[in-house]
Image (cartoon, grey):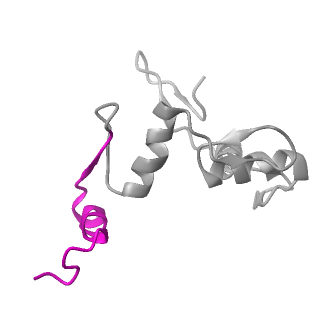
Amino acid sequence: KSYWGTHTGEKSYWGTHTGEKSYKCEYCDARFRHSSVLKVHVRTHTGEKPYKCEHCDVKTIDKSSLIKHVRIHTGEKPYKCDHCSAEFRIVQSLKKHVRIHTGEKPYKCEHCDAKFNQVS
C-alpha cells in the first residue's frame, strides 16, 4: 500500500511530479493535474460564478480573479517595478512593463527575424 493509500490527493501529488493530467473535463477534452484547477475550469462551461464583489455586481469563477477585480475599487497596486516608480494591480502587467527596462523581446515574428516585447 502506498503512503497515500486511497487518499484523493495521491493523483494530484504524483501528477505534479510526472506531469500526468488525471483530471478530465466532462464538457471538453481539457485535462488537468489538479482537481481544484478542473473545478474552476468546469465553471467556464456551467457559468457558475460563486465569488461576488462587495463593491459592485461583478461575479467571478475563482477567488484570485475576484481579488484582482477588487483592486479596481480599492486602488491597491501591490506589484512595484524595481527600475522605476510604476505600480500595478496584477503581476502580469508588471512583467510586461519590466521588459521596457530589460530590453527583453520574447515574441518573434513568424515571417522575419523581428522581435517584440509584447504581442500586438
Residue shown at 25%/56% (left/top)?
A: 19
Q: Residue 4 in the image: x percent, y percent? A: 23, 79
Image coordinates for residue 26, horizontal then vertical, percent? 31, 37
99 versus 107 height, above or below: below
Q: Position of residue 37 (x, y in %)?
A: 43, 52
Magenta stretch containing residue 29, yes or no? no
Q: Residue 10 is drawn in which quadrant?
A: bottom left
| Left or right: 95 as drawn, with respect to 46 | right
Which image quarter is the N terminus in?
A: bottom left
Residue 23 belongs to magenta span: yes
The foreground one among 70 and 101 is 70
Q: Depth check: 45 or 65 in front?
A: 45
Provide the residue span drawn in magenta.
1-25
Q: Quadrant of the C terminus?
A: top right
Residue at the top extreme of this rendering: 111
Q: Is residue 80 above or below residue 29?
A: below
